Amino acid sequence: MERADLIAALARIVGPAHVLSQPADLLNYESDGTIAAHLPAVVVLPGTTNEVAEIVRLANRAGVTIVPRGAGTGLSGGAVSTRQGIVISTMRMNRIVQVDYRNRRAVVEPGVINLDLSTAIANDGYFYAPDPSSQRSCTIGGNVATNSGGPHCLAYGVTANHVLGLELVTPTGEVVHTGGWAWDTPGYDLTGVVVGSEGTLGIVTKAIVRIVRQPEAVRVILGLFRNVVDASRSVSAVIAQGLVPSAMEMMDALTCEAVEAAYHVGFPPGATVLLIEVDGLTDGLDDTLQRIEQICLENGASGVRLSKSAAESAALWYARKSAFGAMGRLAPNYYLQDGVVPRTKLPATLARVGEVSRDFKLPIANVFHAGDGNLHPIILFDRRKPGEIERALEAATETLRACIDAGGAISGEHGIGLEKKKQLPLVFSTDDLCVMAKLKKSFNPYDLFNPDKIFPTSRSCLEVQQVRGGLAGEAARAAIGGPEAIAEAGIEAIGGVPSP
Ligand SMILES: Cc1cc2nc3c(=O)[nH]c(=O)nc-3n(C[C@H](O)[C@H](O)[C@H](O)COP(=O)(O)OP(=O)(O)OC[C@H]3O[C@@H](n4cnc5c(N)ncnc54)[C@H](O)[C@@H]3O)c2cc1C
C-alpha cells in the first residue's frame, strides 16, 4: 500500500486530526529517552480499543510494522519505529475508567499518566504504588510494557505486582482480556506474560490495577556517607535486620553536586546521600527510624538528617526524581545504564564501576534504587570531543559486565528494547531464548509488531542463527522444530551462514 493510501485509510478510522504525517510532527516520535532515532512513516492517535484493533488489522493487510508508544520516556529504544512503520500513540486513551475503593482496584486506559492516577485518588486516601522517577510524564501502558520499577517498589513491589488484568489488542487484531478482578484466574497467567513484554505481544488498551491505602505516617531521613561503598553496605545491613523501608535511594557525591546546584536541598558538599523513607502506623515508626539511623552510623555514615516537614520531604523527593535532569550541570552529554545485582553485591559492583570510570577516564555518577540492587551508572561525556562517545559506550558495557559478573542482569527496569538486545545472550542460554522466541511468535506471527526489539536478530530467530552456526546443536534444533521451522520462518541470510 502506498504511504498516501495508508494515511487516508488511517484517517478514515480515527479522523484526520488524529493522524500525524508531516515531517515536523514525525520528528517528535523519532526517539525515546535513548539515542536511537528512526522516523516513523506515520503516527496515529486512536481514541478507543476498537480503533486500535482496526488500525492493527489495516497494518497487517498492508504489511506495515506497528510500534505502540506511550509518553516516549523509555530508556531502551522500545518505542522507536525502526522500519518506517505506524506508531500507535496511546496519549488520547487517558481515561480513568473506574475506581473501586472497596476492592482496591482501578481500571485505566493505557495513556493515563502514572502520577495522574495517584493524584486522582489522593483525596480519598489512596495511591498507585509503582512510581518510576519519570512518573510525572510516563504512562501506565508504558509501565506495564516495561514492568517499571521505582523508589517505592522496594516495599510495595514493581508494576507486575500491581496489574491484575489487561485488555489487549493482539498483533493479529483481536481484542482479548487476560486476568481479571480477582487475585488469581484459571489458565495460563497471560497477564504475567504481557507485563514486561515491551510492546512485542500486543498493545494494552486497558489495565486493571491495584490501588493502595496511603500510610498513616511517613518519615524521610538522609544518611550522609563518605562513599557509595559504605552507603550500600548500610542498605544490606538495614534489610538484614528485618526492616523494610518503603524506599532506599542512593545518590553519590557527583550526583549530589548536580542535584544540589539545581534544586538547593541542602546536601553537604562531597556527601553520598542515602534517601530513606519509612511508612506505616505512627506508633513504632520513630523506633524504626532510630534503628536505621544506628545501622547507618555503624556502617560508616558521617551523619543522619531527619526531614522536618512534609514540604521538606517533598522537596527531597522532587530532587531525587529529577536527578537525571540535573546531569547537564556536570557534562554536556550522559549515557545512562540500567543493571541489577543482588543487594549484597552492591559494594563490590560500585567499586568496580569506580574502576571503570578511572580506566575509561570518564566521570560516572550513580543514582539508583539501592534497596532493589538496581544500579544506574551515568557516564558523563562530551560528544564534541573525538572518541568520547565511543569510550562512553564501552564504559557502559563494562558496567553491565560488572553486574553480570556479580550474578545480576543487564536491566533492572528499563527493559531491553533496541539498546541491549545484543547483550541478551550474555544472561540467557540458547534454550532460554528459544522458548521466549517461540512465545513471541505465537502472539506475533508476522513479526510486524514492534520488530527488532529484545531479541538479537529479527523475526525472533536468534535460535535459527545459532543452529546455522552450529552453536546450539540438536537441543536447539529440536526446540525450534528443525529445518522445516527454519524454512517456514523465511530466514534467508543471517550472518552469511549457509542453510542447514
Ligand atoms: C527521567 C527518567 C526517569 C526514569 N525513571 C524510571 C524509573 O524509576 N523506573 C523505571 O522503571 N523506568 C524509569 N524510566 C524509564 C521510563 O520512564 C519507563 O520505562 C516508562 O514505563 C516508560 O513509559 P512511557 O509511557 O514513556 O513508554 P514509552 O517510552 O512510550 O514506551 C516504552 C515501551 O512500552 C511499549 N508500550 C508503550 N505503551 C504500550 C501499550 N499501551 N501497550 C503495549 N506496549 C506499550 C513501547 O512499545 C515501548 O517498548 C525513567 C525515564 C526517564 C526519562
Image (cartoon, helix red, strand yellow):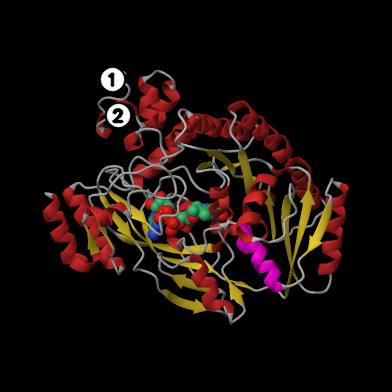
**Which numbered disc covers residue 499?**
1
Residue found at x 62% / y 60%: 263
Nearest to the observer: residue 316 or residue 180: 316
Residue that protrudes farthest toward the bottom in the picture: 124
Residue found at x 72% / y 76%: 216
Q: Is residue 263 above or below residue 365?
A: below
> Looking at the image, do the residues carrying marks 1 and 2 touch, with CB atoms under 8 Å apart?
yes
Q: Earlier in the sequence, mark 1 or mark 2?
A: 2
The amino acid type of the residue labelled 1 equals: Ser
Q: Is residue 319 magenta?
A: yes
**Residue 75 relative to residue 2: left or right:** right
Q: Is residue 157 something that shows in the picture?
A: no
The region drawn magenta spans 310-320
Secondary element at image label 1: loop
Residue 154 lies in what quarter of the image?
A: bottom right
**Residue 371 relative to residue 481: left or right:** right
Q: Is residue 307 above or below residue 232?
A: below
| Quadrant in the picture for the C terminus | top left
